[in-house]
Amino acid sequence: MIQAATADWADYPAFTAPTPARKRFPAAAGVAKMSAKTTSAATVNTDTVDYSALVQAVAQGRDRDAFGRLFAHYAPRLKSFLLRQGADDASAEDLAQEAMLTVWRKAGLFDASKSSAGTWIFTIARNLRIDAVRKARRPEFDAEDPAFVTEAEPAADQAFDAEQTGARVRAALAELPEEQATVVRLSFFEDKPHAEIAEKLALPLGTVKSRLRLAMKRIRTCLGDER
Amino acid sequence: MNALPRHHLDEDTLVAYASGTLAPAASVMVASHLTLCPRCRKALAAAEAVGGALLESESTAAMKTSAEALLARAEVAPQTLKPARPVNDNRDAALLPRPVRDLIGDAEPLTWRWMGPGVRYAHLAGDEKEGKVGLLKIAPGTRLPKHGHTGEEFTMVLAGGYADEGGHFVRGDVEWADGATVHQPHADAGEECLCLVVTKGTLKAKGLLAPFIQPLMAI
């Protein structure tokens, strides 16, 4: 059973942030920037592996080797993510397995022009978690819906490189001011409405909302979306 | 019916929906708005990309199973096929976004409660704690009583339109009101106004007529 999160928000992982390092070793700013590429725990440089291509290999050829590599990378991260959201060990294990099973079965639905592999897999786990916790499917929009309003044809200037964009989002997150990064973290790791997050941080709700707005604005800018 | 919405979802609502922490009633509202709003779908993609980035940056927790063992299970376990969606030949198919139609399901015809002159309400799902979802039908030109809220109210126009202190709202537009908002919505002339409404808490009538109106505002 998934329980409510009990971890103190201060326990959340810092983004691989160059900012703190820069404060301590101002002369090593260049080095600190490079460290943004490595994840906090893994030694593998995720920027060199094209996870989107691995998903496509699974989709096209039932490539078990490609799946193995996806599993090795994402399953332990999914489990850690779910634990951080308050799941107990058994639930986190089960959900991570279910998510990877869904990756295997539904690899054909992955669209590398829309999102990175990590984002797609995140949404799979998110939906499974909602199904389990709420015992009801998550309401979603349906592109086949007669009521669906399509986007105007986008200007096809350049191909969307999902993995590269994903790396830019990670970098943008790592460069957020701490106060914005905290609000973003809590939005994803706490199963709480923002009013409760504001209480937890002893801040007015308006402040929490504006920090979130600012953070998302920076993220969207790096995705080339001016709003 | 082809104009794009001009009143959009708040950032925090989108992020909560993207992270999976938004309450079910509000999620119906968000999914319905996203059906009609390409701009918010793009914003959702950005929020989901944050989720993906957080996943990539996450530390690792050892798995008790291997990829091979999982795949062995995959071959053996029967594929659970999703039941085919019943084809909806209802003329409302293009009017009501799928998330709303799914909620109504087979509960036709809906029970419409009289809420006052020109106003009817049909409860669809939910409760006061997590939020209620319902449909509101307002006759053309009707001026709703001035009211505030003890909780939150999320309104999305599906047909027709209304105007209040926040602006003019037509199909796809969303308006959010909380405890601080007092408004007096006025439905457009010419067409019945149909809205999806999510409420948490209750409405509080304001003004001289409050004692007479309050009993009617028990959504």
Image: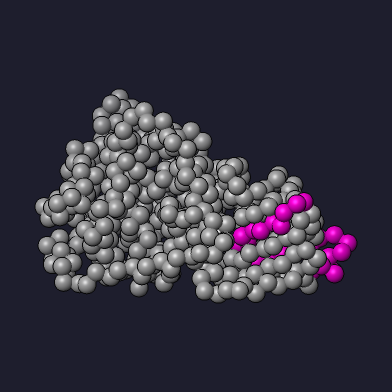
User: What x and y, as percent, mark residue A70?
Assistant: 19, 52
Residue A114's x, y, as percent?
35, 43
Looking at the picture, tell me which residue is in the foreground, A207 or A112: A112
The residue that appears at 61% across and 66% down in the rendered structure is B134
Asked whether residue B164 is drawn in magenta, I would say no
Compared to residue B39, the image places residue B150 above or below, namely below
Quadrant (top left/top right/bottom left/bottom right) for the N terminus of chain A: bottom left
Query: In the picture provided, is A173 more to the left or to the right than B186?
Result: left
At x 49%, y 51%, the residue is A148
Viewer-proximal residue among A50 and A62: A62
- Residue B19 in sight in this render: yes
Q: Is residue B12 above or below residue A101?
A: above
Image spot of residue B56 (x, y percent)? 28, 47
Residue appearing at x 71%, y 44% in the figure: B167
Horizontal relation, residue A118 to residue A222: left or right? left
Q: Nearer the viewer, residue B76 or A25?
A: B76
Dividing the picture into quadrants, the one containing residue A87 is bottom left
Q: Position of residue A37 (x, y in %)?
A: 26, 37
The magenta segment: B189-214
Residue A60 drawn above or below residue A3: above
* Residue A23 seen in render: no
> Residue at the spot x=62%, y=72% of the render?
B110
Find the residue positioned furthest to the right.
B208
Vertical placement of residue A38 versus A97, above or below:
above
- Type of colouring: one colour
